[in-house]
């Protein structure tokens, strides 16, 4: 008996990608084993965190890395690190930012809601947010600036030139924090911008247990870890999450993963395109993530999405304008077949 039967949970097919309300991702058996191995053991957590830093550096090319609870936590802790550094008094004082630089610059359009506003995640550290229209003039007038937080996401309407944004902030001695929560497959490219920290959700494409990965400059990562003695305490990772992250990093095969997922989408699009009433195409990620989705054009996308969600098992897809988008990452052959079967049934000749 599995978790669904035992706890009376709905078995779903998740075609929304790394979608948090549906459980985000599936871990491999090696990651599961690493978690199970860690749970009954005592460890010196600092040592485990050091090993994680080495593993993150090896896998991504970052100087160092830290694990916190999740990316929402990573945003708060990274901003706190920019404000307090490793100064014990400041760490203890936050979120009271008296006497500290506390203005965080966020470009317009980079204020988003992933279930929580990222601006709240910044303010939780005690910082003050300035959402600015032009980064070019954002830093000039104020010595209050403590960090610049930018986002990389497929949902971003107008992606900015990250390298230029980092150079601009650095010209004013302001550290840059990149929220790339769903960007693990291209994390090297984000680190190459020179940002002090790139934040990634381990539980998204890396498929580790829930974990926020802070990757970046050695000094900055040291300051992030120092927040464990302050507001980072409630945002700490579990020992089993750290062990799971190390295992997932050891298994990660970027190019092979990208190729396998692309083939899956291509095969799905070929089959879906044969279904009467459906036009199907591949949709490469607009932000540059090496993940392709399938887009379906149908007469009534809302109705089809509702029918799929009401099916047995329920299938959850994304709206993409007036079309439907499906992400097939980590879905198995049976699930992909079930989606095609439900599409055929929903659009078939039996319907009037
Ligand atoms: C998922 C996501 C987050 C939140 O990540 P968690 O690890 O669930 O806290 C933050 N920012 C972006 C852009 C995301 O996609």
Image (spheres, rainbow, N blue to C red):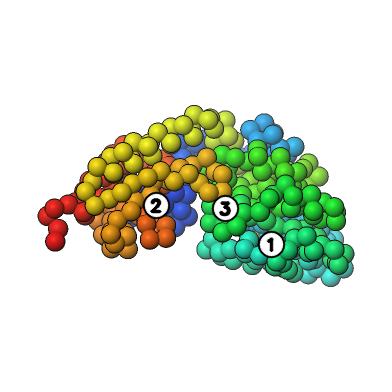
Q: Quadrant of the N terminus?
A: top left
**x and y percent of residue 137 in the render?**
80, 64
In the displayed orientation, state which residue is furthest to the left: 350
Q: Quick check: can you spot residue 48?
A: no
Label 3 beta carbon less than 8 Å to ligand 1:
yes
Residue drawn 21% across and 48% down? 276
Q: Which residue is mark 2?
A: 325
Q: Secondary structure at mark 2?
A: strand
Closer to the chain start, of discs 3 and 1, is 1
Q: Which residue is mark 1?
A: 107
Residue drawn 66% across and 54% down? 160
Q: Secondary structure at mark 3?
A: loop
**x and y percent of residue 296 in the render?**
34, 51
Tag 3: Cα neighbours inside 10 Å, few (<14), some, or many (≥20)? Answer: many
**x and y percent of residue 75 in the render?**
66, 57
Residue drawn 37% across and 57% down? 323
């Amino acid at each position: 008996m599995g978790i669904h039967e035992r706890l009376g949970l709905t078995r779903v097919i998740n075609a929304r990608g790394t979608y948090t309300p549906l459980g985000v991702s599936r871990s491999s058996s090696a990651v599961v084993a690493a978690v199970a191995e860690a749970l009954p053991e005592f460890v010196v957590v600092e040592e485990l965190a050091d090993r994680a830093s080495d593993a993150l550096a090896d896998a991504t090319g970052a100087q160092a890395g830290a694990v916190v609870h999740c990316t929402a936590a990573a945003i708060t802790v990274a901003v706190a690190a920019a404000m307090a550094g490793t100064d014990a008094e400041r760490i203890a004082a936050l979120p009271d930012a008296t006497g500290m630089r506390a203005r965080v610059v966020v470009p317009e359009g980079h204020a988003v809601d992933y279930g929580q506003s990222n601006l709240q995640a910044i303010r939780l550290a005690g910082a003050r947010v300035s959402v600015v229209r032009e980064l070019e003039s954002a830093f000039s007038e104020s010595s209050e600036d403590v960090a610049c937080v930018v986002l990389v996401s497929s949902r971003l309407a107008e992606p900015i030139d990250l390298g230029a944004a980092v150079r601009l902030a650095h010209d004013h001695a302001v550290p840059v924090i990149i929220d790339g929560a769903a960007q693990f497959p291209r994390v090297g490219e984000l680190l190459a911008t020179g940002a002090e920290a790139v934040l990634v959700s381990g539980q998204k494409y890396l498929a580790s247990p829930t974990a926020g990965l802070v990757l970046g400059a050695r000094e900055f990562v040291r300051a992030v870890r120092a927040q464990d003695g302050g507001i980072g305490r409630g945002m700490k990772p579990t020992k089993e999450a750290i062990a799971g992250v190390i295992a997932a990093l050891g298994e990660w095969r970027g190019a092979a993963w990208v190729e396998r997922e692309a083939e899956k989408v291509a095969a799905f699009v070929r089959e879906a395109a044969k279904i009467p009433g459906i036009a199907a195409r591949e949709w490469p990620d607009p932000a540059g993530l090496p993940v392709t989705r399938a887009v379906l054009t149908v007469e009534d996308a809302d109705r089809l999405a509702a029918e799929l969600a009401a099916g047995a098992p329920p299938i959850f897809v994304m709206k993409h304008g007036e079309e439907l988008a499906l992400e097939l990452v980590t879905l198995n052959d049976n699930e992909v077949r079930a989606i095609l079967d439900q599409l055929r049934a929903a659009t078939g000749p039996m319907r009037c």
